[in-house]
Image (spheres, helix red, strand yellow):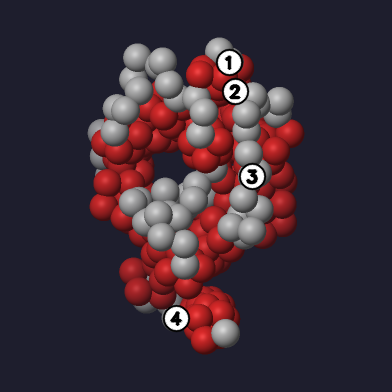
């Protein structure tokens, strides 16, 4: 299997499990209806673990543009392959979302709220505030990439690493996920959001494109920051990339904060 196909299939697996648990818990007349946040976090975490087990030996199982960014900034992955991986991740996420749509086919008509239907596919903020939402996604993805790199630096029983990474996803969801739904993965959010826009989902509403840039930009910045932070602090190699990425994050947050405050004062 090629790395491209590995990333495509692996990301599709994540969305089948992750989007599937969101559908299971949120769509009416599912036996898991109202299963709750803990069920959702474990569904996503175990889905990530299964995906890494499936394709890790073929592509390294990035399955997330933010992880690809983080590993590239850390020096563990060549930038020349980044575009190939990200394209595969996006395609895989859209395919996974389409599978979820088909699996729950009769349940869409039974669910009236178009916002709930969108939540099966993509994230949204509990309290809409671009500055706070961006900050949440940066922090969550920073923790994700830093966690993956520190997990990789430890020796576990053979075959246990993917499960530990899955538990990292669970931990992020339980501890940090309630603010924005913890996209922490641009492909996980944008791919299914595009699928939501294209698929003939009965009674669906808009795909909330005005928010869609946050779960893309935030994770990319957070992933890059996690990669350079690990390289600088854990490896002791303080390259200019650390300061470039840190200043970029601060500048982006400053601009968003200024725009948000200007809106309040108008």
Q: Is residue 53 visible?
A: no
* 146 to 27, vertically: above or below: below
How many numbered marks are there? 4
- Residue 152 % position (x, y): 36, 49
The residues bearing labels 1 and 2 have C-alpha atoms spaced at a distance of: 6 Å
What residue is disc 3 on?
Answer: 207
Relative depth, front residue between 191 and 82 = 191
Position of residue 11 in the picture relative to residue 160 (left or right): right
Between marks 4 and 3 in the image, the one whose residue lies nearer the viewer: 3
- Residue 66 % position (x, y): 54, 55
What residue is disc 2 on?
Answer: 101
Q: Is residue 43 visible?
A: yes
Q: Residue at x 70, y 38 (%)?
A: 197
Of mark 3 and mark 1, the one earlier in the sequence is 1
Quadrant in the picture for the N terminus: top right
Element under disc 2: helix
What residue is disc 4 on?
Answer: 238
Relative depth, front residue between 228 and 18 = 18
Of mark 4 and mark 3, the one earlier in the sequence is 3
**Residue 199, picture quadrant:** top right
**Residue 22, picture quadrant:** top left
Q: Residue at x 26, y 52 (%)?
A: 175
The residues bearing labels 4 and 3 have C-alpha atoms spaced at a distance of: 41 Å
* 133 to 88, vertically: above or below: below
The residues bearing labels 4 and 1 have C-alpha atoms spaced at a distance of: 52 Å
């Amino acid at each position: 299997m090629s790395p491209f196909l590995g990333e495509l299939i692996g990301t599709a697996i994540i969305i089948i499990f992750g989007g599937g648990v969101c559908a299971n818990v949120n769509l009416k007349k599912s036996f898991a209806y109202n299963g709750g946040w803990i069920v959702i976090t474990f569904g996503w975490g175990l889905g990530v673990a299964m995906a890494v087990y499936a394709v890790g030996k073929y592509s390294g199982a990035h399955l997330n543009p933010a992880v690809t960014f983080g590993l590239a900034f850390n020096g563990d992955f060549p930038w020349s392959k980044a575009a190939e991986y990200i394209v595969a991740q996006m395609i895989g996420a859209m395919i996974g979302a389409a599978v979820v749509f088909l699996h729950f086919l009769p349940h869409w008509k039974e669910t009236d709220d178009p916002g709930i239907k969108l939540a099966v596919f993509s994230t949204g903020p509990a309290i809409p505030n671009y500055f706070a939402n961006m900050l949440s996604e940066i922090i969550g993805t920073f923790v994700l990439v830093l966690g993956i790199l520190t997990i990789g630096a430890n020796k576990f029983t053979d075959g246990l690493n993917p499960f530990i990474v899955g538990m990292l996803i669970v931990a992020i969801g339980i501890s940090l996920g309630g603010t924005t739904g913890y996209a922490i993965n641009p492909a996980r959010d944008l791919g299914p959001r595009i699928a939501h826009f294209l698929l003939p989902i009965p009674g669906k509403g808009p795909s909330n494109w005005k928010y869609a840039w946050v779960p893309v930009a935030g994770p990319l910045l957070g992933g890059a920051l996690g990669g350079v932070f690990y390289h600088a602090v854990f490896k002791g190699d303080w390259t200019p990339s650390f300061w470039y990425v840190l200043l970029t994050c601060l500048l982006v947050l400053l601009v968003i904060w200024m725009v948000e405050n200007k809106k309040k004062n108008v």
